[in-house]
Image (tube, coloured by chain):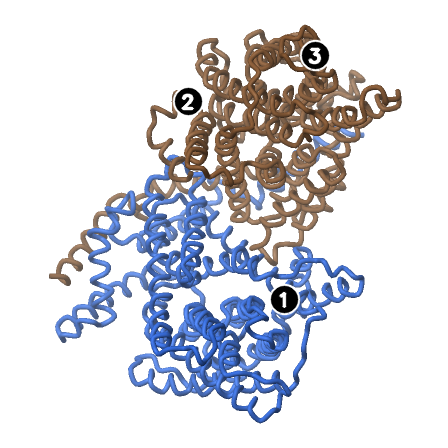
Chain colours: A brown, B blue
Amino acid sequence: VLILFTGFHVTPKIHLICPESCLLIVVGVIIGLLLFYTGFHSVEHLTPDVFFLYMLPPIILDAGYFMPNRLFFDNMSSILIYAVLGTVWNALTIGFSLWGVGLTGLYGVELPLLDTLLFSSIVSAVDPVAVLAVFEEIQVNDVLYILVFGESLLNDAVTVVLYHMFEGYAEMGQENMIPIDYVAGVASFFVAALGGALIGILWGVLAAFISRFSHHVRIIEPLFVFVLAYLAYLNAELFHLSGIVALVFCGISMKNYVEENISYKSHVTVKYTMKMLASSSETIIFLFLGVSTVNDNHEWNTWFVVMTIFFCTIYRSIGVVIQTWVLNRFRLHKIHKVEQFIMAYGGLRGAVAFALVLVISDKIIPTKAMMVTAVIAVVYFTVFIQGMTIGPLVKILNVSTSQKTKLSMNERLHTRIMDYLMAGIEDISGHLMGNYHLRDKFKYYNNKYIRPFLTRDHHVREPKIFETHSKLNLADAMNLVQKNGSAIPVMGKDMNISLSTFFQTYTQTNIP
Amino acid sequence: VLILFTGFHVTPKIHLICPESCLLIVVGVIIGLLLFYTGFHSVEHLTPDVFFLYMLPPIILDAGYFMPNRLFFDNMSSILIYAVLGTVWNALTIGFSLWGVGLTGLYGVELPLLDTLLFSSIVSAVDPVAVLAVFEEIQVNDVLYILVFGESLLNDAVTVVLYHMFEGYAEMGQENMIPIDYVAGVASFFVAALGGALIGILWGVLAAFISRFSHHVRIIEPLFVFVLAYLAYLNAELFHLSGIVALVFCGISMKNYVEENISYKSHVTVKYTMKMLASSSETIIFLFLGVSTVNDNHEWNTWFVVMTIFFCTIYRSIGVVIQTWVLNRFRLHKIHKVEQFIMAYGGLRGAVAFALVLVISDKIIPTKAMMVTAVIAVVYFTVFIQGMTIGPLVKILNVSTSQKTKLSMNERLHTRIMDYLMAGIEDISGHLMGNYHLRDKFKYYNNKYIRPFLTRDHHVREPKIFETHSKLNLADAMNLVQKNGSAIPVMGKDMNISLSTFFQTYTQTNIP
């Protein structure tokens, strides 16, 4: 796989037409076919346990740890609306519609309402792995990116809750349900999401606190980050809360403090090890998705597949348009028509749905095989058709793309000043729950109580600004030396040549 | 464990008296006692599979990858003598002596010769993990370090071969053996060691070659190093060759080329991830060694344990003295009496022996339980008594310690010039197999054929010298900027204060 991966990038043409995720699935299918026709049925496919315990956490931790905090919290309310209301909307409408169509006898199989609702709750959630894989390549603007990606992360809580709820209902049968079950279902939303976030933050704070004392053992600093984040994930999953939400919040809450405490080399190690783990997990997931496609347990039901894809596409579009219309009345940065289209179109489904559908017991849902096939069809449709066309569409529709530049000192200072100014204005206008006011309050308490507790060198009040400053300083230094080349020769120029000739002479005289 | 580890380093006094490995074993024993008396017998102990598949490879890869190549190859012949002859000597003398004492009926158990030889082959090999843990703390001079550590790495091949050989013999019974079996035993030495080395080099070259093309996907560069090295290990173990030797040679052969190809950040990631994995493996090994001690399968046989420890100590000392006497006749850097003592005394046994003794089938060796207890006793004796006293002894005996400094430009250039000079002298004096001549030949072919094939930018003839040069340049740049402080203010000085006051004013006016 590593060799393949390098190959993809060396051949530039394939890479431009087709996202990596598609290529990996294709390779996976080829491997799957080879295994299937040579009779190696016994090769273990992607099991849900392996997926949720080993493959998913690195990707989510990477997402949470490198989350652009400011952007995320600025758009938090919109993201929550899309993630919670949007997913519930999709699950209910798709579930009821599939059930309604089923009543006409089109599928040729009997499908109870609870079964279609369980299926729709799996298939309605946008997948963080697929979204990340595609959106990192097309580079839309930051706000659009954070809306789709934030939704895909946080809707996990909703999916997990809906999934466990409908599974429980399907197990006990519709006739045995009492009203309290419905109330419990709604309540468990908040428990799963808030509980997950709380557990994540607790572990994140613990990691930050430990990193305060780790400067004697630099070598294990990066380990803290990984081990404690993973414990947060396991801890949340243990209580049937959302592990993904826990991991995201663990990453967000530990990051700033940990980065202040650990050494520069530990920072590089954390960053690149995380990226490395995440990208290899992603590779393996898509590859296994391809391999797992090839087996003889499929039950292809054309109408069921067509209807699922149709309803998924339609209801997501309707949902996004309605929610955005409401949100735009409150948002400063309005979401345009084109951006709404990309949001609806970018709702890719992926491996999370596939792993969840595999966990269903076929004792509870007799039509499991049909559902697995339908989920794979939806994943393939979204990853291949939507994933491959979204790039060109972004260009044709002229969606504003991101400018990935590092903030200059000037921008950092002025953003900070604007923050204080806005907080002051919100203060005067009595708008006490405004974004800027809340951020200002957080900064105040953070500097007064939290940072002194969690970091070792907490006398610097604005670490971000000093970080930018010292980076600029280093760049200046390098420039200065390069310009004053006469005093100190710089590698790769004349020094290079003279040394080369020097050694060549030696080598040539020595060896006949 | 992470918290404990940080704790050790924060409390400086414990750390000075007692090496980490001892502390970890003690903690392990405490955990083991807790588990034992609360009835959690079901907790899985360190199984040989887990040990050899997951715990050992990171430590050995770390050792091989960061092996000081020059030192290692300069002392290669001495290391091989100690590793091969020394281990065979120890295994045979300890085995025969234990068997001889057994004939007097001192143990109260019947011990056939092949059983004691199997046992002695396990217990005679110096353990790389234990040696690394202790010798990294006491910091003796480089030559002494590489002799003991190199021996501990390469004697694995011998141990594996002896172990499989005596196990096979014990299984078929002494009476059924034919002369060809003895010959096969001797031949398998060379197969295991050379085969392991060959497999390691092949994978190492492949890793170097792939890294040549990986600059398009920087993020997976570190992964190549880990995955391909691990494949080398598995590949060697698959054929019953020495995985440790394969891993060491894989690390040695890939390092220089990979480091030239990958980016600086990938380099930092490889380095620190490797160190991090190795140190966590080491921690877990010692901890589990402690936990595994506490169980009810022990069979304590005082005389057997005492005799084992006695013979281990005596024969190692005799072996080192005799071999060194021979070697000193050929070595330029003679090994002094004091260094010989430290070499004999530093022959620590550890987790490899423990894992190997657990693998023995008690159908073949009925006295397995007694042997397990004896191995644990030897490990504890060497790690605690010898490991804790070797530090003070090194100071009392005034053993020359290492000066860990980075080579300056001057040293690099002069070492290189001396190399060419010596190679020339060896050439003239007709000493065609001399160290310098061989190195020069290797450098010549390396620059002409191997490097152009394995590296991307191979026009620089002396990469090490340029590395030193560019590091010095950067340091110069930083100094220059710090001295010209008036033009560009440097972080942490006046800039710091003025910015702080600036923001403090803002903060104070904003929040009541």
- Residue A447 shows in the view: no
Q: Residue furthest left?
A: A512
List x then y, in percent, for residue B217: 41, 36
Q: Both on one chain, marks 1 and 3? A: no
How much space separates mark 2 and mark 1, taking CA atoms?
Answer: 51 Å
The disc labelled 2 sits on which kind of residue? Cys
Labelled pair 2, 3 in contact (Cβ < 8 Å): no
**Position of B441 compared to B8: left or right?**
left
Up-down: is A151 above or below A201?
A: above
Q: Looking at the rendering, which quadrant does residue A467 occupy?
A: top right
Query: Where does label 2 land, which residue?
Result: A18
Q: Residue at x 35, y 34 (%)?
A: A7
Q: Nearer the viewer, residue A438 or A76?
A: A76
- Residue B359 shows in the view: yes
Q: Disc 2 is attached to a residue of which chain?
A: A
How much space separates mark 2 and mark 3, taking CA atoms?
Answer: 35 Å
Badge 3 marks a residue whose secondary structure is helix
Query: Where does label 1 land, which residue?
Result: B289
**Position of A163 compared to B265: left or right?**
right
The disc labelled 1 sits on which kind of residue? Leu
Tag in front: 1 or 3: 3
How much space separates mark 1 and mark 3, taking CA atoms?
Answer: 59 Å
Mark 1 neighbour class, 10 Å CA radius: few under 14, some 14 to 19, many 20 or more: many
**Position of A148 compared to B156: left or right?**
right
Q: Looking at the rendering, which quadrant does residue A122 occupy?
A: top right
Between discs 2 and 3, the one toward the N terminus? 2
List x then y, in percent, for residue B147: 41, 74
Mark 2 neighbour class, 10 Å CA radius: few under 14, some 14 to 19, many 20 or more: some
Up-down: is A108 above or below A348?
A: above
Residue A99 numbered tag: 3
Q: Disc 3 is attached to a residue of which chain?
A: A
Q: Residue furthest front?
A: B176
